[in-house]
Image (spheres, grey):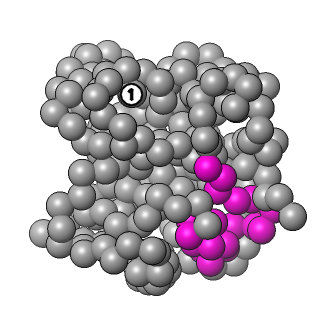
């Protein structure tokens, strides 16, 4: 039986507080992305290191995920050694997994001594599966997660079924990756550059939305330079 955490709220202030509690430098923060049109994306403080998408796990999404898994499982998977990818085995930990994917794949996001630095040092040479198991057994990260999850505006019940899921989009060695701990593999979304990353990630977010046109419950955030 996998452990169950209380789901994190998709609130940038709560998530920013959380990454700082984990040891991420205060130079970085989570910012709401209010629109995916080019002029709206210009408002996000630069540099942007990751785009985090929260979306509903609808039937349409699950069907797409199953088809995508079959396609990827049939292809030879080749990733740079620098890519940090982990599976998610802990219920409701997807917010933490997306934040870890965002930080671990960006060397210039400094992590000070704390629960996250310890976890990344433990996990760096493990397989994606073993990283997921290490997170499940990591008391430091779990405690910080629970403390912030219970601080949000909504009272979350860890036993309640959560239909929303967080994923991270990052640029690793010039390729845009979708990192989702529920998937067996990282998903490549083509070439990107630091200059075009935000637009490229927004395109992927729009693809998620286009698959579920009746669904409005999408939230997009960016891990970006903190505004003082």
Q: Mark yes or no: residue 65 visible.
A: no
Name the element at disc 1: helix
Q: Which residue is mark 1?
A: 208
Q: Is residue 115 left or right of residue 62?
A: right
Q: Is residue 21 magenta?
A: yes
Q: Nearer the viewer, residue 29 or 39?
A: 39
Looking at the rendered structure, the number of numbered marks drawn on it comes to 1
Give the extent of the magenta segment: 14-32
Q: Residue at x 38, y 73 (%)?
A: 154
- Residue 222 percent location from the top left of the image: 63, 46
Q: Is residue 97 magenta?
A: no
Q: Nearer the viewer, residue 181 or 10?
A: 10
Q: Mark yes or no: residue 43 visible.
A: yes
- Residue 105 percent location from the top left of the image: 62, 46
- Residue 87 percent location from the top left of the image: 35, 50
Q: Nearer the viewer, residue 227 or 216?
A: 216
Measured along the vertical axis of the image, is residue 88 above or below residue 22?
A: above
Q: Residue at x 53, y 56 (%)?
A: 99
Measured along the vertical axis of the image, is residue 63 above or below residue 170?
A: above
Q: Residues within 10 Å of mark 1 (few under 14, many from 20)?
A: some
- Residue 89 percent location from the top left of the image: 27, 58
Measured along the vertical axis of the image, is residue 177 above or below residue 26?
A: above
Q: Residue at x 12, y 69 (%)?
A: 1
Query: Which residue is situated farthest in the left direction here?
Result: 1
- Which quadrant holds the C terminus? bottom right
Q: Residue at x 47, y 24 (%)?
A: 206
Query: Which residue is situated farthest in the right direction here?
Result: 228
């Amino acid at each position: 039986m996998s452990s169950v955490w209380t789901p994190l709220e998709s609130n940038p202030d709560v998530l920013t507080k959380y990454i700082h509690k984990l040891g991420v430098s205060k130079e970085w923060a989570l910012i709401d992305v209010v629109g995916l049109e080019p002029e709206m994306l210009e408002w996000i403080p630069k540099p942007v290191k990751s785009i985090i998408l929260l979306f509903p796990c609808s039937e349409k999404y699950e069907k797409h995920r199953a088809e995508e898994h079959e396609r990827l499982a049939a292809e030879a998977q080749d990733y740079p050694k620098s890519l940090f990818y982990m599976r998610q085995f802990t219920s409701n930990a997807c917010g933490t997994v997306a934040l870890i994917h965002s930080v671990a794949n960006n060397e210039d996001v400094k992590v000070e001594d704390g629960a996250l630095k310890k976890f990344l040092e433990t996990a760096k040479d493990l397989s994606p599966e073993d990283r997921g198991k290490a997170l499940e057994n990591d008391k430091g990260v779990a405690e910080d997660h629970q403390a912030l999850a219970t601080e949000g505006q909504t009272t979350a019940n860890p036993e309640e079924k959560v239909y929303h899921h967080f994923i991270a989009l990052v640029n690793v060695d010039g390729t845009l990756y979708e990192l989702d701990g529920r998937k067996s593999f990282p998903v490549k979304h083509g070439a990107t550059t630091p200059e075009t990353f935000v637009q490229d990630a927004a395109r992927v977010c729009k693809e998620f939305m286009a698959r579920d046109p009746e669904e409005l419950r999408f939230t997009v955030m960016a891990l970006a330079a903190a505004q003082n």
